[in-house]
Image (tube, rainbow, N blue to C red):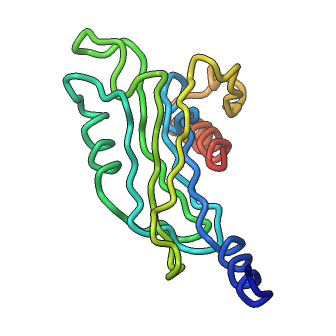
């Protein structure tokens, strides 16, 4: 039987514990790119945070390699903070390939602990990667084409387009 003070303590920890979410979203690098976003939406730090993925490409390429290091390196993620890293690139690359990085599906498992001294086992959750089953993602508008501009004016306009597009993606 729990006493009121015990129940209040447990309720307090549940309200202030870390909650880590993982999602694959459209990439900040532009169309045909995808990023993984890891966010702590809880009220306390997620400590010893590690991630696992069930389907790594073989061989591990220049996108998947740093991502694997990110997943395998324990870290602390403060409340309200997030980490964003490239997940997948698609296109016609100079080496003849059409994709780099991770696949369009799979499961990411996240594991972490909190500062709660009574929490002995780590928190654990699974998040699905479903790029092909996510519907149509909106892309930030870049505005009209800079067709009539030349020289420095065109470069400045293109810089503005890129900035507006990337800012539109930041909170996605």
Q: Quarter of the image holding residue 164?
A: top right
Q: Quadrant of residue 140?
A: top right
Is 59 located above or below residue 47 in the figure?
A: above
Looking at the picture, how far across and down is residue 125, in whole percent?
Answer: 54, 48
Residue positioned 31% across, 16% down in the render: 93
Q: Residue at x 38, y 28 (%)?
A: 102
Please determine whether, in this image, residue 172 is positioned above or below residue 141: below
Q: Quadrant of the N terminus?
A: bottom right
Q: Could you tell whether 131 is left or right of 145 in the image?
A: left
Nearer to the camera, 80 or 86? 80
Question: In the figure, is residue 139 to the left or right of 60?
Answer: right
Residue 110, image x, y percentages: 46, 50
Which quadrant, please, contains the C terminus?
top right
- Point out the residue furthest to the right here: 4
Q: Position of residue 63 (x, y in %)?
A: 31, 34
Determine whether, in the image, residue 92 is placed left or right of residue 136.
Answer: left
Q: Give above or below for 73 relative to 55.
A: below
The front one of 35 and 17 is 17
Number of marks in picture: 0
Q: Residue at x 56, y 64 (%)?
A: 81
Query: Which quadrant would residue 141 be assigned to in this image?
Result: top right
Kindly give the residue lying farthest to the top in the view shown: 96
Position in image of residue 92 (x %, y %): 36, 12
- Which sits in the foreground, 105 or 101? 105
| Left or right position of 59 against 101 | left
Q: Name the residue at the bottom extreme.
A: 5
Q: Nearer the viewer, residue 168 or 131?
A: 131
Q: Residue reaching furthest left? A: 59
């Amino acid at each position: 039987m729990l006493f009121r003070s015990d129940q209040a303590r447990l309720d307090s920890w549940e309200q202030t514990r870390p909650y880590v979410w993982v999602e694959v979203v459209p990439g900040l690098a532009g169309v045909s790119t995808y990023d993984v976003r890891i966010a702590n939406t809880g009220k306390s730090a997620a400590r010893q945070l590690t991630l696992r993925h069930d389907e790594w490409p073989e061989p591990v390429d220049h996108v998947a390699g740093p991502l694997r290091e990110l997943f395998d390196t324990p870290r602390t993620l403060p409340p309200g903070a997030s980490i964003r890293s490239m997940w997948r690139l698609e296109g016609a690359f100079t080496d003849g390939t059409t994709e780099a990085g991770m696949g369009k599906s799979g499961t990411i498992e996240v594991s972490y602990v909190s500062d709660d001294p009574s929490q002995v086992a780590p928190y654990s959750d699974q998040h699905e990667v479903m790029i092909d089953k996510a519907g149509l993602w909106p892309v930030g508008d870049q505005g009209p084409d800079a067709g009539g501009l030349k020289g420095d004016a065109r470069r400045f306009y293109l810089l503005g387009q890129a900035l507006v597009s990337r800012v539109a993606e930041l909170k996605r």
